[in-house]
């Protein structure tokens, strides 16, 4: 999984959120992540292999939930963004429900 693949997925999802009239802050978070990933001097996969999702979280513009989403996508190819309406479910339950 390359950074270009990740950027494409983040942009596509941000556009889907925009079309579904989702919270503007959520759309902005995905767009900021695009900029952050484009600015990296290494591949996300390398960063995640070295530091885990916390390596992504340390980058300005990427929060903890989005870091988990990007790390999972980079390593597995599975796109499983956090969904606010399932906020009360543990993330492991959420991932299982989306598989």
Image (cartoon, rainbow, N blue to C red):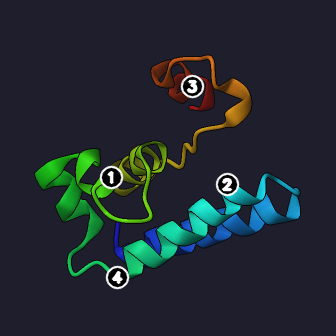
Q: Can you say whether 21 is above or below 98 in the image? A: below
Farthest residue toward the left?
A: 50
Q: In 3D space, how far apart are the residues under numbered discs 4 and 3 (Cα atoms)?
A: 30 Å
On screen, residue 71 versus residue 31, left or right, reads left
* Mark 3 vs 2, N-terminal side: 2
The x, y position of residue 55, in whole percent, is 23, 54
Q: Which mark is residue 26?
A: 2
- Mark 3 packing: few (<14 Cα in 10 Å), some, or many (20+)? some
- From the top left corner, tell me how far across and down residue 45 is, in percent: 25, 61
Q: Residue at x 66, y 37 (%)?
A: 83
Residue at image position (43%, 52%) is 73
Q: Are marks 1 and 3 in contact (CB under 8 Å)?
A: no
- Residue 61 at what x, y percent from top left? 44, 64
Does residue 15 lie above or below 26 as drawn? below
Q: Earlier in the sequence, mark 4 or mark 1?
A: 4
Q: Quadrant of the C terminus?
A: top right
Q: Which mark is residue 57?
A: 1
How far is mark 4 from mark 2, CA to CA?
20 Å
In the picture, the disc for residue 94 is: 3
SS for callout 2: helix
How far across and down, in percent of the image, does residue 3 sit? 37, 74
- The quadrant in which the N terminus is found is bottom left
Query: What residue sits 69% from the left and 57% below the top?
Result: 25
Q: Quadrant of residue 56?
A: bottom left
Instruction: Tell which circle, 4 or 3, labels the residue nearer the N-terminal end.
Output: 4
Does 53 appear above or below 19?
A: above
Which quarter of the picture shows residue 97? Answer: top right
The residues tagged by marks 1 and 2 sit, at their Cα atoms, a distance apart of 16 Å
């Amino acid at each position: 999984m390359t950074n270009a693949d990740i950027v494409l997925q983040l942009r596509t999802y941000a556009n889907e959120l925009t079309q579904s009239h989702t919270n503007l802050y959520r759309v902005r978070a995905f767009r900021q992540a695009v900029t952050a990933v484009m600015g990296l001097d290494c591949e996300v996969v390398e960063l995640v292999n070295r530091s885990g999702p916390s390596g992504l979280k340390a980058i300005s513009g990427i929060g903890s939930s989005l870091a988990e989403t990007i790390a999972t996508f980079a390593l597995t190819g599975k796109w499983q963004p956090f969904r606010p309406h399932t906020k009360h479910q543990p993330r492991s339950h959420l991932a299982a429900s989306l598989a």
